[in-house]
Image (cartoon, coloured by chain):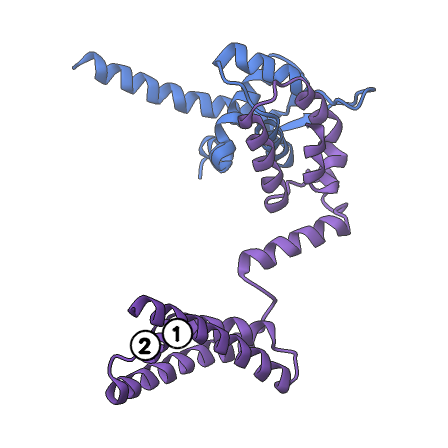
Chain colours: A blue, B purple
């Protein structure tokens, strides 16, 4: 399996959490954020309101696989940031989605 | 609403509790939100995510909860392969026995309610035998006989009553 495919597969293994995980990675691509800030950003970007159960289910998976990491914080509301692995996984996933979107649009243009 | 956090495993609460509480407190209460939190709690028990840095810090409480959930998911107490084989054979044997009994009774008594009651009891009989064998495996033979006998008698009497009332 190539590295790009492997990176892409990281998120695909998340099951029902794969979409929330992708949205979290997109949100963190701009810089470190804590949980509530992520939900606000995701709602603004994707018009999706993640519930806390879904948000932390996805966050825990991302952290466990080393795609994000918590930063030290004084008030225990740890902000998170993308790791190098997370950045690669996000790039790979977005590339794959863009390839699908381009193909879809090209085919629609011919109909 | 934050009391729902108690449904999550202790280790999980220790790691994400404060942040989770903050996010939860800022959400508008709705059925969807409650469902989301409950589903998250079930997921946290069934699929505990352990960060690389603290994989050896899982505490006994979490292990116990997981063990309980596993027991529920697999349908009962732990069985060795040989015990499972015995329970399986007993349930097959009981199914054959009751099938033979039903055929014999049908030949003799035809369509009597008591025969119909045997038929309906036979549907649950093998499963009942299996479950009882599994749960009573460490009990005395006398206890097993009494519980099995009482259970089967109660089931048969119930089916008999249904057949008698239904036949009128």
The chain letter for the residue carrying disc 1 is: B
Position in image of residue B64 (x %, y %): 71, 54
Label 1–label 2 contact, CB within 8 A? yes
Instruction: Measure the C-alpha gap from mark 1 to mark 2.
Output: 6 Å
Q: Nearer the viewer, residue A30 or B141?
A: B141
Position in image of residue B42 (x %, y %): 59, 42
State the residue at coordinates (48%, 14%).
A46
Give neighbour class at mark 2: few <14, some 14-19, many 20+ (Cα, 10 Å): some
The number of callouts visible is 2
Disc 2 secondary structure class: helix
Above/below status of B36 relative to B83: above
Q: Give the quarter of the figure containing the C terminus of chain B.
A: bottom left
Q: Is residue A14 left or right of residue B15?
A: left
**Residue B113, disc:** 2
The furthest residue to the top: A44
Position in image of residue B148 (x %, y %): 54, 79
**Residue B25, disc:** none
Q: Earlier in the sequence, mark 1 or mark 2?
A: 2
Quarter residue A103 falls in: top left
The chain letter for the residue carrying disc 2 is: B
Above/below status of A69 relative to B89: above
Position in image of residue A109 (x %, y %): 21, 12
Q: Is residue A50 left or right of residue B19?
A: left
| Residue where numbered disc 1 is placed | B160
Q: Is residue A41 left or right of residue B97?
A: right
State the residue at coordinates (77%, 48%).
B59
Above/below status of A16 relative to B122: above
Quarter residue A110 falls in: top left
Q: Give the quarter of the figure containing the N terminus of chain B.
A: top right
Q: Nearer the viewer, residue B87 or B103?
A: B103
The furthest residue to the front: B168
């Amino acid at each position: 399996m190539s590295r790009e495919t492997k990176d892409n597969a990281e998120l695909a293994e998340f099951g029902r959490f794969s979409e929330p995980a992708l949205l979290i990675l997109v949100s963190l691509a701009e810089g470190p954020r804590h949980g509530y800030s992520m939900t606000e950003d995701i709602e603004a970007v994707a018009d999706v309101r993640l519930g806390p159960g879904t948000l932390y289910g996805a966050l825990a998976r991302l952290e466990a696989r080393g795609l994000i990491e918590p930063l030290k914080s004084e008030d225990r509301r740890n902000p998170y940031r993308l790791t190098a692995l997370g950045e690669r996984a996000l790039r790979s996933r977005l590339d794959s989605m863009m390839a699908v979107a381009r193909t879809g649009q090209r085919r629609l243009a011919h109909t | 609403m934050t009391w729902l956090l108690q449904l999550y495993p202790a280790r999980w609460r220790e790691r994400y509790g404060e942040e989770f509480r903050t996010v939860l407190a800022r959400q508008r209460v709705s059925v969807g939100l409650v469902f989301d939190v409950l589903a998250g709690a079930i997921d946290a028990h069934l699929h505990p995510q352990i960060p690389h840095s603290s994989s050896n810090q899982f505490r006994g409480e979490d292990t116990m909860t997981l063990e309980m959930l596993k027991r529920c998911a697999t349908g009962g107490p732990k069985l060795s392969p040989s015990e499972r084989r015995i329970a399986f054979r007993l349930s097959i044997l009981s199914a054959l026995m009751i099938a033979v009994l039903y055929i014999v009774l049908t030949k003799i008594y035809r369509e009597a309610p008591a025969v119909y009651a045997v038929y309906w009891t036979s549907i649950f009989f093998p499963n009942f035998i299996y479950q009882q064998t599994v749960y009573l495996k460490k009990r005395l033979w006398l206890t097993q006989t009494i519980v099995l006998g009482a259970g089967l008698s109660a089931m048969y009497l119930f089916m008999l009553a249904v057949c008698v009332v239904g036949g009128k």
